[in-house]
Image (cartoon, helix red, strand yellow):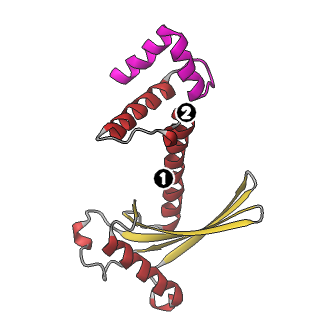
């Protein structure tokens, strides 16, 4: 599954137009399937409707995408207290069942959000002022290596990434263990 963004204007516009028309005239699109999930927790209610279509006949370059089986749309509506927000996203996929697509979509964003959250909280990545040449990209690679190594360190049990970083600063043996994980 690959998320479609507006930097792929032809594909994005095709998906946007297709689903707009399919939702207005569902009788003309029998190949489109859908399912809905509702998540509650942490003071928020999230309702997501997933749509999946296997109709690639209107897509000119469908053969260029190896394994492409369809494309999907996710309409999410989140309520936190009195504040409501909605969002629509599109994707191309090799998946053929809408429930599998929905599960993969949630897992994809859970991993994505977990990684970025961890990098921001533990490494304060969003506040980095490094902007020149290739330095931001290089430092991002270093942070990813460091995060991976810290996650693999077994001790102390249930220590946060932030705490493991602090232990590395005080204990050279612990730091050496983290560096060994990066070099393996």
Could you classify mark 2 by the number of other residues whose Cα lies within 10 Å: few (under 14), some (14-19), or many (20 or more)?
Answer: some
Which region shows up in magenta?
Answer: 154-183
| Residue at 50%, 91% in the rendered image | 27
Would residue 26 be found to the left or right of residue 44 on screen?
A: left
Label 2 sits on residue? 122
Between 93 and 5, the one lying in front of the other is: 5
Whether residue 75 appears in this view of the structure is no
Q: Secondary structure at mark 1?
A: helix
34 up-or-down from 142: above or below: below
> In the picture, residue 13 is in which quadrant?
bottom left
Which residue, given by chain and number where applicable, does mark 1 sit on? 108
User: Residue 8: within the magenta?
Assistant: no
Tell me the quarter of the image containing the C terminus: top left
Give the residue at x 32% y 66%: 68
* Classed neighbour count for the residue bearing mark 1: other residues with Cα under 10 Å, few (<14), some (14–19), many (≥20): some
User: How far, Cα to Cα, is label 2 from label 1?
Assistant: 21 Å
């Amino acid at each position: 599954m690959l998320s479609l963004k507006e930097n792929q204007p032809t594909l994005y516009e095709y998906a946007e137009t297709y689903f707009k028309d399919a939702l207005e005239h569902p009788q003309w699109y029998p190949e489109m399937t859908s399912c809905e999930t509702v998540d509650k927790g942490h003071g928020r209610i999230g309702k997501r409707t997933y749509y999946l279509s296997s109709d690639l006949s209107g897509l000119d370059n469908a053969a260029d995408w190896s394994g492409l089986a369809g494309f999907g749309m996710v309409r999410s509506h989140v309520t936190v207290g009195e504040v409501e927000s909605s969002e629509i996203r599109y994707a191309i996929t090799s998946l053929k069942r809408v429930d599998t697509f929905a599960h993969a979509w949630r897992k994809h964003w859970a991993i994505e959000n977990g990684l970025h959250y961890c990098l921001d909280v533990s490494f304060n990545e969003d506040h980095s002022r490094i902007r020149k040449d290739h330095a931001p990209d290089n430092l991002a690679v270093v942070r990813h290596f460091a995060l991976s190594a810290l996650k693999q360190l077994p001790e102390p049990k249930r220590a946060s990434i932030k705490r493991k970083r602090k232990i590395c600063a005080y204990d050279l043996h612990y730091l050496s263990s983290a560096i060994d994980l990066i070099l393996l």
